[in-house]
Amino acid sequence: MIQQRKYIPRLKANVPMEQEDMDFNTLLDISKGNSELEEIVIYSITTALVKKLTHSADTETLTHWLSSIQPTTPTTKTLANSELEAQMQNIKTQNSTYAEAISELEAKIYQLNQDKQILENELSSFVTDMRKLNHEKLQLQSEKEQLIANLNDQKNQVEEISQKEQKLIAERDTYKLEVGHIQHKLAIYHQKYAIPEEVYNMYTRLPPVILQGLSSIFKGQDTVVGFLLCGAGDYRRLEMFWDYIEHSISLYPHELNKLNTIFDYLFDLNRINHPQFKRLEVGIGTPFDAEYHIRTGRATGIVKEVVLRGIVNTTTNKITRKTVVLL
């Protein structure tokens, strides 16, 4: 058996059957009649083919070739077929395992493709959102820059308005000073000219009978200046004027206020040169005092009305004219 086995050529791996060095049928023809040799040839060829065809899972080729072999020894054929069937069953089992594995892999690949598609969609949506956000960011940045520019413009306007306000305040203060000067001048003018003229007009509108009674005091002056000089320039004339008013209280009660106004103004002018003379102050409700008062009405009581204020010399404290009061 050993000597016969060395004449059997080896099958070349990965070489088609038609390209082998020796035809399998030729080998079988040579081994016919020798059951032991025939068994060896069939076993060797079968083993080689199984190994060769296992890699390609070409069971159809193997089955076809085996069907063409007609070994002369039944025992050898049975053994070869049994081993071949076992190997074929193993191949089928492996193929089934591979098919299941492939099916699982295909399912995983399908799921991965689905997940990939979902992720790609999410990525696309994310990219779209990012582009939208970037666009909105650019718009907001532009609006921010515009707002900053507007704010700067408003700040500049506020500064300009503030400067104008300060200028207007300064001008207002200047105008106030000017108005104050003007008002002061007007007051001086009013005191010097308007009031004297009003007093003089009040004097000239007195009833003729009163003017006649005062003619000896004012000497018929027909100008404002002459009237003032005559009435306020001589204190003795003022005392005469006071005496005339006291005499006219009961005769011309309706002209009493005008006469008092004229006398008060002339007396104030006279005090510029004779400050020692002052009018007496008598309060309403003060008890009657014969030292200071001349009464009209009841003999006793409290002062209800001051009719004509008196005069006191503050230097000598002498009352030159008492106050005429109504009790």
Image (cartoon, rainbow, N blue to C red):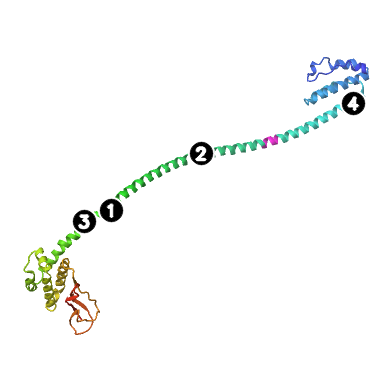
**Alpha carbon separation for disc pair 2 and 1:** 57 Å
Residue 142: assigned label = none
Nearest the viewer among 262 and 50 is: 262
Residue depth check, mark 4 versus mark 3: number of the one nearer the observer: 3
Which disc is residue 79 wearing?
4
Q: Residues within 10 Å of mark 4 (few under 14, many from 20)?
A: few
Mark 2 closeness class: few <14, some 14–19, many ≥20 residues within 10 Å:
few
The CA distance from mark 1 to mark 4 is 134 Å
Label 2 with label 1: CB-CB less than 8 Å: no
Q: Splitting the image into 4 quarters, where does residue 179 fall?
A: bottom left
Ranked by sequence position, the earlier of labels 4 and 3 is 4
**Is 302 inside the magenta-drawn segment?**
no
Q: Secondary structure at mark 3?
A: helix
**Amino acid type, residue under disc 3 in the picture:** Ile
CB under 8 Å between discs 1 and 4: no
Residue furthest bottom as drawn: 299
Question: Which element carries disc 2, helix, strand or loop?
Answer: helix
Q: Is residue 69 visible?
A: no
Give the residue pinned by disc 3.
182
Q: Secondary structure at mark 4?
A: helix
Range of residues picked out in magenta = 106-111
> Which mark, residue 134?
2
Among numbered discs 1 and 4, the one appearing first in the sequence = 4
Residue 113 position, x and y percent, is 65, 35
Measure the C-alpha gap from mark 2 to mark 4.
79 Å
Residue count near mark 1 (Cα–Cα under 10 Å), binned few <14, some 14–19, many ≥20: few
Three-letter code for the amino acid on which mark 1 is drawn:
Asp
